[in-house]
Structure formats: structure tokens, C-alpha cells
Amino acid sequence: MSGLYYTHIASPVGQLLVAGTGDALHFLSFPSGHKAFGPRADWRQADAPFREVARQLDAYFAGDLQRFDLPLHLSGTAFQNSVWRYLADIPFGDTRSYGQIAAELGRPKASRAVGAANGNNPLPVILPCHRVLGADGSLTGFGGGIPVKEFLLRHEGVLPRNRGSATRLFNGFS
């Protein structure tokens, strides 16, 4: 995909890579995890298109923003796009299971497909796939890694803040 700009934005979980056009955000990647990626050869580095993205991410991590309001470019299948739009409506501090999402989308047997769509989410945190848990409440796959998912859920008050590896792991990041 050419014509994209990118920059890195500091966060409590490390430098986030964001990419998009001047009109819409296309990608966000964590510095670690199985979905981490770097800028592509045809992307150009620029900070200006991402000032509002950086402001909203800073506000989210400071606890001052619970829902992002950014123009997004989603290029998935119709089903993936429906899952990603659903993710945007899961409230801060709340969670859903893959099965709940499948049922609410009218596809009660599609929980694995919901999981696959989550796994292909190009904008984690912005489209909060970290708020999706296993049916038993377990912390299942996350492109940034389970410790990052745990950190985000602690940040949102879903998990207690005073225990757990993610709190200790990310305490030193600025």
C-alpha cells in the first residue's frame, strides 16, 4: 500500500508504529508480539498527520479518554469490518467474549471467525480488541502479546492494578 505516512508514538507499552494517510489511520503496531511490524519501504516518515492520533493515545493512557474519535480506513472483509466496528462500541472498562460478539452479530456459531477477525485487527487499542476474552474470561491471543493485553485491561480497571506481571513489566516505560 503506497502513499502512506508513518510515525512512532511513545506509550507506556513502548513505541507504537502508526501509519495512514492525511485523511485516515490505517495501522497501529505494538513494538512486540506476533503482530509487530515495521514501516514498509514505500511509506514516508512524517509526524504532522498523526498529531491528533498522538493526542488521543496520550489522553487514553493518561486515563482521560475512553473512546477514540479518529477517521479510520478499514480494508477487511465485510465480516471483519463488522467485527471491527463492533469492537469500537465495547465500552472502556468492559469486556465481551468471542461468542457474545458472534451472537450479537447474528452469527452465533462464528466465535472462531470473530477471533480470526480480532487477530487481523489493524488498529488495536483504537479498535479495542484487548477487551475480548475467552468464554471463561481467560486472556486469549493478542497481537501485542498477552502482557500488553493484561496491561491495557488493568489500565481500564478490568483487572486489579496491584498484581500481575504486566504491571511490573511495563512500570519502567515512559
Image (spheres, grey):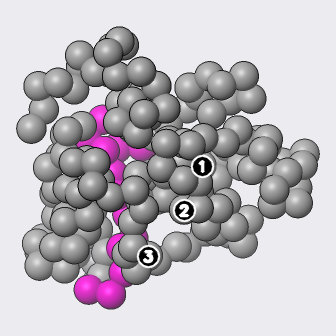
Task: Examine the image and state in which quarter residue 95 appears.
Answer: top right
Determine whether, in the image, residue 53 is placed left or right of residue 144: left
Please name the amino acid that badge 3 sits on.
Leu
Q: Position of residue 74 (x, y in %)?
A: 52, 73
Screen quadrant of the N terminus: bottom left
Please name the amino acid that badge 1 sits on.
Asn
Whether residue 120 appears in this view of the structure is no
Residue drawn at 59 percent across, 61 percent down: 89
Residue 118 circle label: 1
Please name the amino acid that badge 2 sits on.
Ala
Depth order, front residue of 95/14:
95
Determine whether, in the image, residue 147 is placed left or right of residue 133: left
Question: Which residue position holds label 2?
Answer: 88
Q: Where is residue 67 in the image (x, y as percent from the top left)?
A: 42, 62
Prevalent SS, magenta region: loop
Query: Does the magenta-highlighted stretch encompass residue 28?
Result: yes
Magenta-highlighted residues: 22-36
Q: Position of residue 70 (x, y in %)?
A: 37, 75
| Distance between mark 3 and mark 1 Cα atoms | 16 Å
Which secondary structure lies at badge 1? helix
Location of residue 87 with respect to 112 vertically, above or below: below
**Disc 1 versus disc 2: nearer the observer:** 2
User: Who comes first in sequence, dot 3 or dot 1?
Assistant: 3
Q: Position of residue 163 (x, y in %)?
A: 35, 12
Question: Which residue position holds label 3?
Answer: 72
